[in-house]
Amino acid sequence: MEEKKLQAFLKQSAEILQDFFPADALALIPLLYSTLIWAVKRKGNLEAEVSGLRLWLEPEVVDNKPDEFILDFFEKQQALQEAFKAEIKSRDMKSLRPAFRALYPVVGLEEPFLQSLFSEELAREDFRLIADQFDWKLKQALEEIKAAEKKPELWKALKKIGESFMSLGWAWLSDDELRAWLKSILGMERQGEEEEE
Amino acid sequence: MKRRGIGFDHNHTTHNPGYRRLAVRGFYQYPALIFFLAVFLSSCASSPLLKARTDYLQAQELERSLRQEEATAFYKKSREEASAIINKKPTAEAYLLKGLAEVNLNLWAEAENSFRLAAALGEDKALAWAEELRLYGLARSFEAQGWTETSSRLYDILADKGKYQPVVRAAVGQLVDLKLQARPETEANSPASQKEKSKTLSEALKIVERAVESEPACGYYHYLLAQVLAHQKDYRESLEESVMAKELGLPSEKINRDNDLQIVFCYEQLAKILSGEELTAFQISYNNWVKKWKWLNETTPAWKRS
């Protein structure tokens, strides 16, 4: 029952946001997902969370990590280790470093917007594809948001979606449960499962 | 600079009190800016300006409470209110407030323009700030074009001589990141390259240590220090600096997460190196922090679900 309500809510929210984006926009679902995640995680001022999302995409961490840190990142997760087996074995930092630059924010820092943007690839554990497509896909999504931002109602609409979401009581769910539900209903996991089938 | 530990090597479970005192004292060590802001903000008497000022102060308060995202919303609000005042009647105070909000929103070019206009309307202090912002913007654009030496030189000047704290912090961050940039693989293993790398890391260390000395309570500087120390494979000190950064507070969730992963990385490296009683003592000490931060275990920060 709850799942059906959530499904209906997300469908309605996506329809509202469709007014701001072109039909095949990459940014729509990531923006919706990260808005809801931040809304629930912080339980604070939603406008602030949305603004936070925008700043979240600014480069501000130290990007240049030591080789040991990068190797450790690739070795820690089995799927990552598998995908970059040859490079790890030969300590091919020339290949690993650019892949790390793309994968670290998605897999390491778990940035919700990027996780949603690369949800299909993540579900299939296709880390090489994320590394290859990271720059152009992120650039395109950011350009879409930039274009949508010209309509000032975008942030108001997102705020309203977040507020409605909070008022419907799903904020009581644990982060894990909510993430799983959202991912499943927004199709972020289903695509991967379908691929497996 | 002699750094002081926070207890991983002495079985202590809390911060070194001496360092903590130093850090807390440092928090109050930029009186010129605070005094200037207080005088400037209290002089904004008209009602819309009062509202913009109140929102700016609210943003600062939220920032101090580490509620960065909410602070951002208030900076935006304050900026919009200042813009509305300017649209009706441009004043130096309104432009200055707009510029201050813009700096906090990372709108460097817009802030420079606002400060210039504030200066043109009689606010002398704003001119110096605009110049520093201009230099910073120039350095960023040189960096984007691949002119790293020129941009490094500009960041260095700002880090050393800058007076406007947000610009100085940003310049130190950029400068350190540039210094840590990996050398091309073909020359990475030659003795000359190793020597050069070691020299560059020492330079980066000096830059951050200088910054920490000037602002001991700035979590971001401790985060930078931890990053440099990890490049030097000094994992114990890097861990201590990361813990210090976390405790003092970091400017964004993204940096906070990166810092957490640095803590985990250093912990794992040290767990491999240490043995016997030393390892046991280290783990007890480390686990006290893990418990305090409510992490799921030694290697899983609360935000990490996978």
Image (cartoon, grey):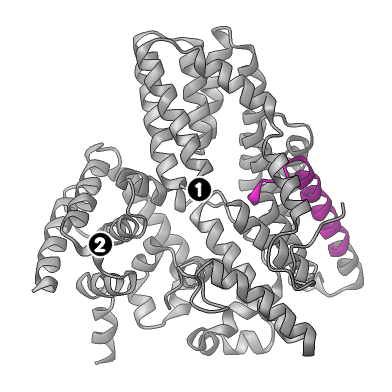
Q: Position of residue B179 (x, y in %)?
A: 75, 55
Q: Could you say which is closer to the camera, residue B23 or residue B146?
A: B23
Q: Is residue B14 left or right of residue B254?
A: right
Tell me which secondary structure the magenta stretch mostly adopts: helix
Residue at figure coordinates x 57%, y 63% from the top left: B258
Q: Does residue B226 appear anywhere in the picture? A: yes
Residue at figure coordinates x 17%, y 58% from the top left: A14
Q: Which mark is residue A2?
A: none
Q: Could you say which is closer to the camera, residue B277 or residue A46?
A: B277
**A65 is higher (above) or lower (below) than A163:** below
State the quadrant of the C terminus of chain B: bottom left
User: Tag 2, which secondary structure?
Assistant: helix
The stretch of residues the image draws in magenta is: B197-219
Amino acid type indicated by mark 1: Leu
Q: Position of residue A15 (x, y in %)?
A: 13, 56
Say if the magenta span includes residue B208.
yes
Q: Which mark is residue B66?
A: 1
**B210 is higher (above) or lower (below) than A35:** above
Query: What residue would you read off at disc 2?
Result: A171
Q: Position of residue A109 (x, y in %)?
A: 50, 66
Q: Position of residue B233 (x, y in %)?
A: 78, 72
What chain does badge 1 belong to?
Answer: B
Q: Residues within 10 Å of mark 1 (few under 14, many from 20)?
A: some
Q: Is residue B222 left or right of residue B79?
A: right
User: Tag 1, which secondary structure?
Assistant: loop
Q: Is residue B214 left or right of residue B144?
A: right
Residue at figure coordinates x 24%, y 52% from the top left: A162
Q: Does residue B147 appear anywhere in the picture? A: no
